[in-house]
Image (cartoon, rainbow, N blue to C red):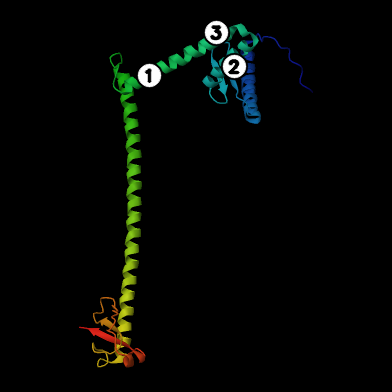
Amino acid sequence: MGRGKIVIRRIDNSTSRQVTFSKRRNGIFKKAKELAILCDAEVGLMIFSSTGRLYEYSSTSMKSVIDRYGKTKDEQQVVANPNSELKFWQREAASLRQQLHNLQENHRQLMGEDLSGLNVKELQSIENQLEISIRGVRTKKDQLLFDEIHELNRKGSMVHQENMELYKKISLIGQENAELYKKIYEAEGPSEVNQDSPTPYNFAVVENRNVPVQLELSTLPQQNDNEQSTAPKLGLQLNP
């Protein structure tokens, strides 16, 4: 058996009226929520029962919906009636002036000025705001200092690593010089390496292994024609 059509009129029975109100209220709230989700709409719904109780639903916030409704209503009135445009902009200017005044007053209070008309609760609220701001500033400052210290430590580690690499290269060069000295000493012998070598170029090899080998070139005075015809020989000179 199908459901009969209900006549839309006030229900006289209070109990039936309350039950119907509860059911249809839940249904319209459900539909409003579905409309907001499915259609990405901003929905605001307010219902007052016969007893004066308020029921409301908003997809964002009821205040935002009401403010948007009032602004849109005024704009529509301006479009419909060009003569009211001046009044609309006057209200906007007055609202902006009031907001600016409130911001300036709040700034003076945060700076410790114009506190004579405030009670203890308002002063406590300002003090809490300042403490929160100070904590935020200190946290930001500590973070910046920590980042700078971390960067300096990183640069110091890089410089230390570069110094170690340079020290290794110097040690390697010292070892190569020492090996070169050994090879020269073993090849020529101590008797052949002296300062009286007749060659036009003399090499001086420092015996200290901790210091790189120094090769010194010196040109001997001009010799006679017989000596110049002889091919020059390279000799090694040991510096004491």
Cβ–Cβ below 8 Å for labels 2 and 3?
no
Q: Amino acid at mark 3?
A: Lys
The quadrant of the picture occupied by the C terminus is bottom left
Q: Looking at the image, is mark 2 or mark 1 nearer the viewer?
A: 1
Q: Residues within 10 Å of mark 1 (few under 14, many from 20)?
A: few
Nearest the viewer among 193 and 78 is 193
171 lies above or below 239: above
Question: How far apart are the alpha carbons under marks 2 and 3?
Answer: 15 Å
Instruction: Specify the label residue 87 is tagged with.
Output: 3
Q: Secondary structure at mark 2?
A: helix
Question: How far apart are the alpha carbons under marks 2 and 1?
Answer: 29 Å
Nearest the viewer among 67 and 218 is 218
Q: Amino acid at mark 1?
A: Gln
Whole-percent x, y for residue 164 in the image = 32, 66
The quadrant of the picture occupied by the N terminus is top right
User: Of the residues under marks 2 and 1, which one precedes in the sequence?
Assistant: 2
Residue that label 2 marks: 72
User: Of the residues under marks 3 and 1, which one precedes in the sequence?
Assistant: 3
Q: Looking at the image, is mark 2 or mark 3 nearer the viewer?
A: 3
Query: Does residue 222 appear left or right of residue 56 in this picture?
Result: left
- Which quadrant would residue 172 be assigned to in this image? bottom left
Query: Does residue 109 appear left or right of residue 85 in this picture?
Result: left
Whole-percent x, y for residue 52 in the image = 54, 11
User: Of the residues under marks 2 and 3, which one precedes in the sequence?
Assistant: 2
